[in-house]
Image (spheres, grey):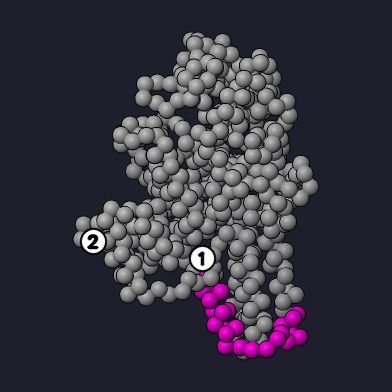
Amino acid sequence: MKIYNTLTKKKEEFVPIEEGKVRMYVCGPTVYNFIHIGNARPMIVFDTARRYMEYKGYEVNFVSNFTDVDDKIIKKSIEEGVPAEEISERYIQECKKDMAGMNVKPATTHPQATKEIQGMLDMIQVLMDKGFAYNVDGTVYFRTRKFEEYGKLSHKNLDDLRSGGRSLLVTGEDQKEDPLDFVLWKPKKEGEPFWESAWSDGRPGWHIECSVMSKKYLGDEIDIHAGGEDLVFPHHENEIAQSECANGKTFARYWMHNAFLNIDNRKMSKSLGNFFTVREISEKYDLQVLRFFMLSAHYRSPINFSQEIMESSKNALDRIITCVDSLKRIADAAEGGCTEAEHTKLAEMSAFRTKFEEAMDDDINTADAIAAVFELVKFANTEAVSGCSKAFAEAVRKEIIELCDILGLIVEKKEEVLDSDIEALIQERTAAKKAKNFARADEIRAQLLEMGIVLKDTREGVVWTRA
């Protein structure tokens, strides 16, 4: 199995530190609002990488954090007049609902930055003791130039960065020894959450959080560190510097980064009005369609989101689901074991799994893996027809379901829900909202979504559609 390593800029054979085990860290979202579809891409692609590694027999310790202390969370808490912790906890729960909708497996551990402060204080102190960090009036900075390999991930040169314009120079540069030094700890401002430290009452810098959470749950040295390509510099670069200086070991052997997601060929932004949350998408489509769309391109290729492409993804996924459903009906109506000719066909069918595995072994090429699934669907539609044996139809159906499951795609039809059952649940939800039992109302909405029913609250009442 080969992985493209951002560190070396080439595909490399994957060899884990410990045979049969994979330690993998993926940077998670900052939880101040519903996750957007840009957040969804790394969640889906690295969940798929994990699933494939598990399929190959690896035991994967998969850690993905929630950044639950941040300027945006504090801003939202001030706007709403509630504690920052209430904001972060609310959106962690909402994020987990969206992840479940996209069939993203829960991480082995989902650490939260605010629960790991002591580890951050300890690592900062180690860096200070080793001379890699210094304190100026309660703000602790990392001495970037003291780490000789700084820039090895982003392939940036420190002197080029220094002359590369003031946009890279962080606030407070006057008190820093070097404008490229970055913050490990900062004093609190009025009304902000804070923790006590030897330097000041304050909070950690963003970069130190991931270094500490990775170290605690995966160890000093890990196999794979992953995230969006926007994190390569400065976040991942700074993580390497902190971790390797503190621990005295290589931080991560392989670095995987997914490319950007564009909307109608433009960068997603609120100012352009092309900003979509996963929750908004779920009101129009089953989130399995979003997952299929994300996997239909290689993770290192930029991907373009549009209404037309989502419709195309829905139709493509429906082709697989229809095939699986058709095979079930054929199997239910048939009987008996495979004939000799069918045994020969099943042997031929193994070529599709081989193609699938070859694609996934080549840097998790989900686009080509999906192409192999469609070849299998074509085979099924040609060979597993009325008159075939029960065993043959079931074997072909099982093969499609298994390969799709590696991709995290659910292709078995949900049981048709009666309109009367839907209406009853909607009435119960309305009653729960009137009684201010919002938790139950949310539960019912999630339950309906799982059943493929999308709700939209309008002034005229609740409108529902089948996804």
* Closer to the camera in the image, 226 or 297: 226
* Closer to the camera in the image, 205 or 397: 205
What residue lies at 48% left-to-right and 60% top-to-bottom?
A: 289
Residue under label 1, please give it.
Answer: 317
What residue lies at 74% left-to-right and 81% top-to-bottom?
A: 343
Q: Are marks 1 and 2 in contact (CB under 8 Å)?
A: no
Using the numbered discs, state the Cα–Cα distance from disc 1 to disc 2 in whole angstroms.
31 Å
Viewer can see residue 14: yes
The disc, 1 or 2, on the residue closer to the chain's N-terminal end is 1
Viewer can see residue 45: no
Q: Is residue 331 magenta?
A: yes
What residue lies at 39% left-to-right and 64% top-to-bottom?
A: 448
Classify mark 2: residues with Cα within 10 Å, few (<14), some (14-19) or many (20+): few
Label for residue 368?
Answer: none
Classify 338 as above or below 245.
below
Q: Position of residue 231 (x, y in %)?
A: 55, 35
Residue under label 2, please give it.
Answer: 461
Which label sits in the foreground, 1 or 2? Answer: 2
Task: Check the picture and name the quadrant holding the C terminus.
Answer: bottom left
Classify 234 as above or below 158.
below
Classify mark 1: residues with Cα within 10 Å, few (<14), some (14-19) or many (20+): some
Of the residues shown, which amino acid type is indicated by label 2? Gly
**Which residues make up the magenta segment?**
321-344
* Closer to the camera in the image, 55 or 145: 55
Callout 1: SS: helix
Q: Main secondary structure of the magenta part?
A: helix
Number of callouts: 2
Q: Position of residue 26 (x, y in %)?
A: 59, 42
Q: Position of residue 99 (x, y in %)?
A: 49, 52
Q: Position of residue 396 (x, y in %)?
A: 65, 75
Of the residues shown, which amino acid type is indicated by label 1? Leu
Q: Is residue 424 magenta?
A: no
